[in-house]
Amino acid sequence: MRESPSQMEIRVAIFANVLELDAQGEPVNEKHAECRAATWLNRYCTGELHPGEPDIEPWECQLH
């Protein structure tokens, strides 16, 4: 990650894009958002996904 800081930016983007908030602004799926960011990191490092894990969708890693 130190050699390519943009990889951290993508992980933060995935977390933020997947995270859902309730009416009071509290996260309702924080663990799922963390898992999706971790999925991207795992695929980046190993080239593979865990069995049964869906691939990262383009909208998940879109930077705003």
Image (cartoon, helix red, strand yellow):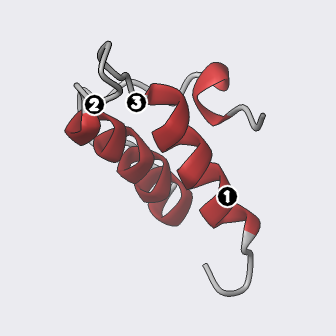
Q: CA distance from mark 1 to mark 2?
A: 23 Å
In the picture, the disc for residue 1 is none
- Residue most extreme to the front: 24
Question: In the image, is 44 to the left or to the right of 46?
Answer: right
Q: Amino acid at mark 2?
A: Glu
Viewer-nearest residue: 1 or 17: 17
Q: Position of residue 35 (x, y in %)?
A: 29, 43
Query: Which class describes the residues within 10 Å of circle 2: few (<14), some (14-19), or many (20+)?
Result: few
Q: CA distance from mark 1 to mark 3?
A: 15 Å
Viewer-nearest residue: 21 or 5: 21
Q: SS for tag 2?
A: loop
Q: Amino acid at mark 1?
A: Glu
Q: Amino acid at mark 3?
A: Leu
In the picture, the disc for residue 9 is 1
Q: Position of residue 28 (x, y in %)?
A: 22, 25
Q: Position of residue 11 (x, y in %)?
A: 55, 53
Circle nearer the viewer, 1 or 2: 2
Query: Which class describes the residues within 10 Å of circle 3: few (<14), some (14-19), or many (20+)?
Result: some
Is tag 1's residue or tag 3's residue first in the polypeptide sequence?
1
Residue marked by disc 2: 26
Residue at 56% from the left image edge and 52% from the top image edge: 12
